[in-house]
Amino acid sequence: MKFVDEAKIVVKAGNGGSGSASFRREKFIPKGGPDGGDGGKGGDVILIGDEGLNTLIDFTHKKHFEAENGVSGKGRQMYGKSGNDLVIKVPIGTEVYDMEMDRKIGDVTENGQAVIVALGGKGGLGNMHFKSSTNRAPQQFTRGEDGELRHLRLELKVLADVGLLGFPNAGKSTFVNAVSKARPKIADYPFTTLYPALGVVRIDSETSFVVADIPGIIEGAAEGAGLGIQFLKHLQRTGLLLHMVELPSYEGVDGPVEQFKALEIELEKFSNELQGKERWLVFTKSDLLPTDEIDQKVKKYTKQLKWNRPVFVISSITHYGLNELNQKIAEYLNTVDEDIWD
């Protein structure tokens, strides 16, 4: 399925029904008086989170949504029926922006969570409300109010505890494959990952966390090169970033230090907030080096980077270091005080 993480739609809430100007007309009751009923309220437009959805692709085919209008009131004090609400299902992690006001009006982060994005108009009043001692036969009534019309931008940000960050072929997809039941596409060429993929890592029966793999970032991504820059926003909700770097150096390819620094520049261009998130350095593909070279290279690279945060060395092929890394991730997430979805 094609992954779509942004969509623009137009929603229109239902109009309220008008009130009625009616008079009681019954045999033997010559002066029955006003009995016009009120109009019904227009239906609201509501977005609701659905854990069965993972893309906004449905909104590429249908972009206009309109709730039901309220019914006008009638004589004999009969109230008009309210219009039915229009419920639109969206993936969990959908942020809702009002394009005209240029501000966020909702954030769907739980299954079944409802966000009203357009209010239906109020129903009008019937003439029975305007009777007074000086106006025994009022002709007045009010029309129903119009429902809200809004132009919305929907933006999907995947909900994950841990986000993977790195250049293409840094070993992110292989890591997800090794630690979870997710099976992302893996190949020896750039941009194997074309859209975010989620994997659930289970430590035991009570402990688990969700990992998000996004397309690899390349130098110049902030200016539009590559694929990953359009998906960096998906890492903004994560509680922890794993910056994955290949430990081996290849002829004709920038070394780990150069790749790390290049990606740092792209992060800074995209978001200071993202760059400042808790981030651990993970050296991958250690199985491609002799054992006696691993510690030497890790010490050399971390010194050159002046890195003083946690460092891990793994091989997703041999599973070297995976248990230790996963345990440390679970311990960290368990001690985080702040709500990582904020």
Image (cartoon, rainbow, N blue to C red):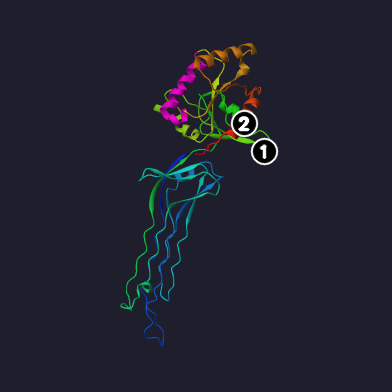
Tell me which residue sits at (43%, 26%) in the image.
Answer: 268
Pointer 1: residues within 10 angstroms few (<14), some, or many (20+)?
Answer: few
The magenta span reads 252-275
Q: Residue furthest right?
A: 205
**Main SS of residues in magenta:** helix
Pointer 2: residues within 10 angstroms few (<14), some, or many (20+)?
Answer: few
How many numbered marks appear? Answer: 2
Q: Which mark is residue 206?
A: 1
Identify the image quadrant of residue 312.
top right
- Residue 216 location, x and y as percent? 50, 27
Identify whether 256 is placed above or below 89. above
Tell me which residue sits at (38%, 54%) in the image.
Answer: 148
Q: Mark 2: which secondary structure?
A: helix
- Tell me if I can see residue 276 in this picture: yes
- Residue 252 location, x and y as percent? 49, 13
Q: Kindly identify which residue carries mark 2.
A: 331
